[in-house]
Image (cartoon, helix red, strand yellow):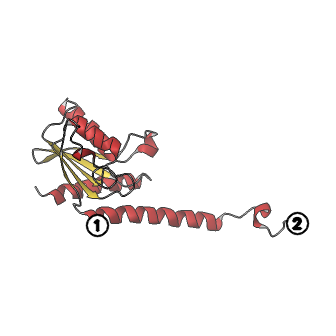
Amino acid sequence: MDDAVFMQQAISQAHNAWALGEVPVGAVVVKDGAVIATGFNQPIGTHDPTAHAEIMALRAAASILGNYRLPGCELFVTLEPCAMCSGAMMHARLARVVYGAPDPKTGACGSIVDLFAQERLNHHAEVVGGVLAEECGNLLRAFFAERRRALQRKLAVSPMPPELSGSDAPLD
């Protein structure tokens, strides 16, 4: 199958995160050309800082396969993985990591650091970036634009207390 087909499935997972108010990042784990596990961001709802889409998908895949090692598996994710997720992918011994949009703030596949290129580390997965990058990036931009609009609406309808508005404050 084509990488774009699996990335579309990761994008579908990202929409699940958005529906729950989470940053829309989705992931799928593929083995032998078939999706075996999925995941989406859930750190807010689960109160778990490790509940990134990639980690959720890796946990599900490991449970399904009955092994914490996932040799021969590929992970497709809509946003460039962070250092935590990249480390988990290395420990899982993934064969390949494919991501959509780069992450200029926390990306660990080349944007900030490239953990997979560190020769001293004991496992190296093939990394492919930029698959449906525009679609993945647009999803994130739309999510954050919606959040900013909601915040602006909330601030616009919230009455400001007189002590902060300055209108009724004494001038001394």
Residue 129 position within the rendered picture, expressed as x and y whole percent measured from the top left = 23, 57
Residue at (30, 53) in percent of width and height = 80
Residue extending farthest front: 120
In the image, taking residue 168 as reference, residue 87 lies left or right, namely: left
In the image, taking residue 155 as reference, residue 144 lies left or right, namely: left
Q: Quadrant of residue 49?
A: top left
Residue at (44, 62) in percent of width and height = 144
Quick one: quadrant of the C terminus?
A: bottom right
Residue at (23, 55) in percent of width and height = 9
Q: Is residue 32 above or below residue 139?
A: above
Where disc 2 sits, the SS reads loop
> Which of the pair 13/109 is nearer the observer?
109
Where disc 1 sits, the SS reads helix
> Which of the pair 163/115 is nearer the observer?
115
- Give the Cα distance between marks 2 and 1: 53 Å
Residue 13 position within the rendered picture, expressed as x and y whole percent measured from the top left = 30, 52
Label count reads 2
Residue at (23, 61) in percent of width and height = 130
Look at mark 1 in the image and give the residue it sits on. 134
Crowdedness near tag 2: few (<14), some (14–19) or many (≥20) residues, C-alpha within 10 Å: few
Crowdedness near tag 1: few (<14), some (14–19) or many (≥20) residues, C-alpha within 10 Å: few
Three-letter amino acid code at the position of disc 2:
Pro
Q: Quadrant of residue 78?
A: bottom left
Q: Is residue 94 above or below residue 24?
A: above
Residue 15 position within the rendered picture, expressed as x and y whole percent measured from the top left = 34, 56
In the image, taking residue 155 as reference, residue 124 lies left or right, namely: left
In the image, taking residue 156 as reference, residue 130 lies left or right, namely: left
Look at mark 2 in the image and give the residue it sits on. 170
Three-letter amino acid code at the position of disc 1:
Glu
Residue 47 position within the rendered picture, expressed as x and y whole percent measured from the top left = 46, 39
